Image (cartoon, coloured by chain):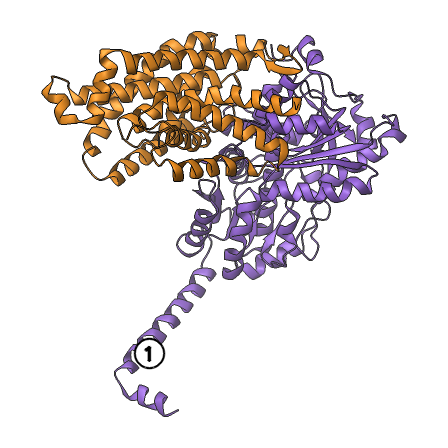
């Protein structure tokens, strides 16, 4: 029983990090219905930013996440205005090709600038806390992962409030639901889309900054998270920020519990299997609006 | 017969004649070009410069550039093949030119690129791909065109066991190297080591390289007298290994035989630290243990202290050789200041052998190259790596490539601990048991 509970707790901790990675995509894809295959690359840029600021200026990732989020917000806006706006009204394949192209461009630019070497952000507050655990009834909680998960949850709640309770958030939702109607009430759809891309890029970059404390930093790191993020957003339901959080926690737990009882090769098979099962019963996802 | 006669009477005759004439011209042109003086020797390199294995590809690229530099420039005191003098003496000093292609770590693309290198660029030799999995994909292409192919860092035993005529490997294979680890563990008690190591868990990733290691360890561990208590395979690109660590912890092995790439190794270390999991011995085979960036990162955390693994060379002893120091100096020009790791040493040794073979063949004709390769008998003093030499068996595997076992010390450097004679020369006392995470945190860090 302890074994199962430990696996569930491990899964929840990882799930909180997955949620942060997926939430940017939930805004761009889930809410604004635009495809972004370069999502993981924004995260990779965040990780590289954390590594670079840590190794050159000695800035801890927990502080570096602020300037990185601002820069990445700007990059997200630029990507929308200079690239995605041009393909937005076209076929969805145009968006797929544009973002896959962006993925390759960003990845190879980083390879050219920093090489493909693995880099490790080791001298950080969270890294120094590694090995510090909280024991609760025989269940071990790693303090750094717990802190990272809590930061992720806090950001998630802030975003949820922004989207659901503020005028900006409601404007974003209105734009995604009916662009023309939104224009009639004075909302600038392009501005909203640009903001969604900025927010999406900034959030996933922050996720990258946090993850840099736990994962090695290299140009190809984004893809494995992008695939999971797509499954999480689809599972949680399009347009639902809360759904994304629950789906991410579910994915973390499914991954973790599966491996305790079955061969690790089944880990992702069960994640995507759960997605298929829920997709059959509820094609719009667990909490999808559309 | 009638049909053939009818066909010959028709308008197809000029077409047949034209095709025949073209084929004859092409054959003659091929002969003419082969006989023309060689202005440059072309070696095609297909490498994973981007994608999942880019970190390996870069080391191979720098190694190739180092060899190109050594061959094309005069290093009079450098005791390696084609070190002294410029270019290939057999071709009047013609330079070596590498034609490099990036396959993005994809086997299908590697296959296409090899075809292009052979048919369009007309290279004389192919070197690559650097990973065993993708090399197994390009082997049939080189074989069908009859062009020599080499991959010296590729360690999968299957590469030289398929009966290919045109594939050569100067480096040791996984069987040789993993056997070194289990030979060491078996004989360790008789040489002052612990006598309480009884059980083994195998933990590897899922590609050809990892699975080869998995099967070899599965075979060799019981033969060396150890009981297998857990066997886990994970997908490359894992985002968490917490549950895998949980299972390993429950199995409680004395020895963890661990084969993972650097990214997954970092994930494992974080999860193992959180769970407080540390077996008495962590034995590895290639993967992160051969990656210079992972090794450097361990100096900041002591994370690798006490890990032991197989290596193709006693790097602590080899690096004292003057030729090693000179080659490393050249390598650093291309690697942005990074020192040669054992992977680069294997690749440079292999590519210098290729250059030497082409020079000895005095021709770029594949048959002559194959003959020169078969006649290879390189002595150890011509190498920067401590193989016993280069001499091939019938499968084109270097039978003199050997393995050693090294351990990462508290200084973050690798030290030779097997064979016993070399270990004595290295004068290093092995760390046992593998330090706990708390010990690692409390000890001074070499890079802080």
Q: Chain of mark 1?
A: B
Relative to B82, is B216 on the left or the right? right
Residue in the image at 58% along x and 34% along y: B75
Chain B's shade in the image? purple
Task: Point out the image quarter for the C terminus of chain A.
Answer: top left
Residue in the image at 22% along x and 40% along y: A91
Foreground residue, B382 or A259? A259
Relative to A96, is B282 on the left or the right? right
Which residue reaches farthest front? Answer: A281
Q: Which chain is orange?
A: A
Foreground residue, A249 or B34? A249
Is B220 drawn above or below residue A136 in the view shown?
below
Foreground residue, A67 or A112? A67
Residue A251 placed where, x, y %? Answer: 48, 28
Is B184 drawn above or below residue B446 in the view shown?
below
Residue B225 placed where, x, y %? Answer: 84, 38
Which residue reaches farthest right? Answer: B190
Task: Point out the image quarter for the N terminus of chain A.
Answer: top right
Q: Residues within 10 Å of mark 1 (few under 14, many from 20)?
A: few
The reply to whether residue B65 is visible in this rendering is no
Judging by the rendered image, the residue that carries numbered circle 1 is: B16
Determine whether the residue tagged by mark 1 lies in a helix, strand or loop: helix
Residue A276 placed where, x, y %? Answer: 43, 39
Residue in the image at 63% along x and 48% along y: B169
Snapshot quadrant of residue B131: top right
The reply to whether residue B23 is visible in this rendering is yes
């Amino acid at each position: 029983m302890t074994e199962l509970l430990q696996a569930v707790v491990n899964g929840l901790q990882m799930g909180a990090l997955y949620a942060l990675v997926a939430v940017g995509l939930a805004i761009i894809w889930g809410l604004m219905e635009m495809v972004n295959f370069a999502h993981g690359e924004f995260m990779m840029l965040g990780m590289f930013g954390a590594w670079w600021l840590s190794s050159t200026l000695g800035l801890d990732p927990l502080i570096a996440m602020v300037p990185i989020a601002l820069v990445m917000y700007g990059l997200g806006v630029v990507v929308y205005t200079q690239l995605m706006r041009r393909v937005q009204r076209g076929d969805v394949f145009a968006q797929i090709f544009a973002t896959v192209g962006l993925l390759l461009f960003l990845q190879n630019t980083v390879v050219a600038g920093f090489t493909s070497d693995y880099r490790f952000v080791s001298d950080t507050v969270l890294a120094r806390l590694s090995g510090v655990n909280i024991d609760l009834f025989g269940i071990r909680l790693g303090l750094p992962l717990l802190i990272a998960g809590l930061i992720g949850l806090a950001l998630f709640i802030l975003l949820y409030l922004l989207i659901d309770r503020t005028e900006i958030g409601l404007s974003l939702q209105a734009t995604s639901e009916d662009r023309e109607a939104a224009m009639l009430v004075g909302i600038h759809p392009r501005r909203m889309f640009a903001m969604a891309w900025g927010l999406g890029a900034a959030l996933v970059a922050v996720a990258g900054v946090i993850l840099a404390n736990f994962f090695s930093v290299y140009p190809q790191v984004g893809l494995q998270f992008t695939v999971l993020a797509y499954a999480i957003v689809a599972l949680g339901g399009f347009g639902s920020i809360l759904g994304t959080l629950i789906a991410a926690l579910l994915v973390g737990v499914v991954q973790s519990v599966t491996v305790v009882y079955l061969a690790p090769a089944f880990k992702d098979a069960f994640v995507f299997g759960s997605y298929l099962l829920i997709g059959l019963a509820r094609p719009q996802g667990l909490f999808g609006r559309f | 017969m009638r049909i053939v006669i009818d066909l010959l009477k028709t308008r197809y005759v000029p077409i047949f004649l034209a095709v025949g004439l073209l084929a004859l011209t092409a054959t003659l042109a091929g002969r003419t070009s082969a006989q023309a003086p060689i202005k440059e020797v072309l070696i095609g390199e297909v490498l994973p410069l981007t994608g999942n294995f880019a970190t390996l590809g870069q080391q191979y690229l720098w190694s190739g550039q180092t060899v190109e530099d050594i061959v094309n420039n005069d290093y009079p005191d450098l005791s390696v093949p084609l070190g002294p003098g410029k270019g290939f003496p057999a071709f009047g000093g013609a330079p070596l030119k590498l034609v490099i292609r990036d396959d993005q770590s994809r086997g299908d693309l590697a296959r296409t690129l090899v075809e292009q290198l052979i048919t369009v660029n007309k290279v004389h030799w192919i070197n690559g791909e650097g990973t065993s999995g993708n090399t197994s994909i390009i082997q049939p292409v080189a074989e069908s065109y009859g062009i020599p192919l080499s991959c010296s860092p590729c360690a999968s035993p299957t590469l030289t066991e398929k009966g290919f005529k045109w594939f050569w490997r100067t480096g040791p294979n996984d069987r040789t190297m993993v056997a070194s680890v289990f030979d060491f563990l078996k004989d360790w008690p008789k040489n002052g080591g612990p006598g309480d190591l009884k059980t083994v868990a195998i933990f590897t990733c899922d590609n050809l390289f990892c699975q080869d290691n998995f099967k070899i360890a599965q075979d060799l561990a019981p033969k060396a007298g150890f009981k297998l208590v857990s066997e886990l395979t994970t997908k490359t690109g894992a985002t968490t290994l917490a549950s895998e660590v949980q299972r390993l912890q429950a199995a409680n092995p004395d020895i963890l035989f661990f084969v993972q790439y650097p990214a997954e190794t970092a994930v494992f270390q974080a999860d193992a630290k959180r769970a407080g999991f540390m077996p008495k011995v962590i034995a590895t085979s290639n993967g992160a243990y051969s990656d210079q960036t992972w090794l450097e990162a361990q100096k900041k955390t002591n994370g690798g202290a006490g890990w032991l693994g197989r290596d193709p060379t006693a790097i602590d002893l080899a690096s004292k050789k003057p030729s090693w120091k000179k080659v490393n100096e050249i390598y650093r020009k291309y690697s942005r200041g990074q020192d040669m790791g054992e992977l680069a040493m294997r690749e440079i040794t292999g590519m210098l052998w290729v250059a030497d073979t082409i020079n000895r063949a005095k021709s770029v004709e594949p048959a002559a190259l194959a003959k020169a390769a078969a006649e290879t008998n390189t002595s150890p003093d011509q190498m920067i790596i401590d193989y016993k030499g280069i001499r091939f068996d019938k499968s084109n595997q270097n039978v003199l490539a050997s393995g050693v076992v090294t351990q990462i010390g508290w200084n973050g450097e690798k030290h030779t601990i097997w064979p016993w004679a070399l270990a004595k020369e290295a004068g290093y006392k092995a760390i046992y048991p593998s330090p706990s995470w708390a010990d690692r945190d409390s000890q001074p860090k070499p890079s802080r």
